[in-house]
């Protein structure tokens, strides 16, 4: 598998050809995309196109890596890797995990099942 050309991605901030992240979750979102690409779930050009479309449809107020998540949801549904119901269920689980996690602690999905 070829190394993806990050310069094809509109809006990405690079330092010495490496992405710059403000928060750990941004690196995790980036890693999810790279992992799916490396497994052959989609071509890099497809990802760049979906991300570009997502960015262009935004009003300019959404943080960059939130747009990555939106684009990721779009491409995995386009490729039938997951469906809308599964995405909605996972979002609900993460919201429950957030609400069940004490302030300052990492939000972990297994916390969704704690009361």
Image (spheres, helix red, strand yellow):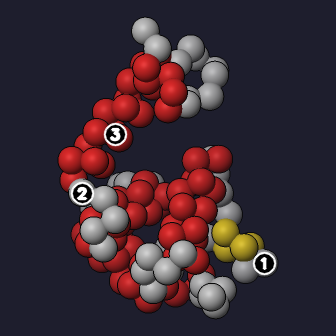
Q: Residue at x 55, y 31 (%)?
A: 108
Q: Earlier in the sequence, mark 3 or mark 1?
A: 1
Q: Mark 3 packing: few (<14 Cα in 10 Å), some, or many (20+)? A: few
- Please report contact status of discs 2 and 3: CB closer than 8 Å, yes or no: no
Q: Judge by depth and name the residue closer to the eye, 45 or 40.
A: 40
Outermost residue to the top: 115
Q: Judge by depth and name the residue closer to the eye, 15 or 100.
A: 100
- Please report contact status of discs 1 and 2: CB closer than 8 Å, yes or no: no
Q: Earlier in the sequence, mark 1 or mark 2?
A: 1
Q: Mark 1 packing: few (<14 Cα in 10 Å), some, or many (20+)? A: few
What residue would you read off at disc 1? 16
- Answer with left or right where residue 71 lies relative to residue 25: left
User: Looking at the image, can residue 10 be seen?
Assistant: no
Residue 99 lies, in percent from the top left, at 42, 19
Task: Say which element carries label 1.
Answer: loop
Q: Judge by depth and name the residue closer to the eye, 17 or 70.
A: 70
Nearer the camera: disc 3 or disc 1: 3
Q: Residue at x 21, y 47 (%)?
A: 85
Location of the C terminus by quadrant is top left
Q: Is residue 53 above or below residue 27?
A: below
Q: Residue at x 58, y 16 (%)?
A: 103
What residue would you read off at disc 2? 83
User: Looking at the image, can residue 92 be seen?
Assistant: yes
What label sits on residue 58 in the rendered view? Answer: none
Q: Quadrant of residue 58?
A: bottom left
Q: Is residue 83 above or below residue 47?
A: above
- Answer with left or right where residue 106 lies relative to residue 78: right
- Answer with left or right where residue 70 lies relative to residue 109: left
Q: Is residue 53 above or below residue 22?
A: below
What label sits on residue 91 in the rendered view? Answer: 3
Residue 63 lies, in percent from the top left, at 44, 55
């Amino acid at each position: 598998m070829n190394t993806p050309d990050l310069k094809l991605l509109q809006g990405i901030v690079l330092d010495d050809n490496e992405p710059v992240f403000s928060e750990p979750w941004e690196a995790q979102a980036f890693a999810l995309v790279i992992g799916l690409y490396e497994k052959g779930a989609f071509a890099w050009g497809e990802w760049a196109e979906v991300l570009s479309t997502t960015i262009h449809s935004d009003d300019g107020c959404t943080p960059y890596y939130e747009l990555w998540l939106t684009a990721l949801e779009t491409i995995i549904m386009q490729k039938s890797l997951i469906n809308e119901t599964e995405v909605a269920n996972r979002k609900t689980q993460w919201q429950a995990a957030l609400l069940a996690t004490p302030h300052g602690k990492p939000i972990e999905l297994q916390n969704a099942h704690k009361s």
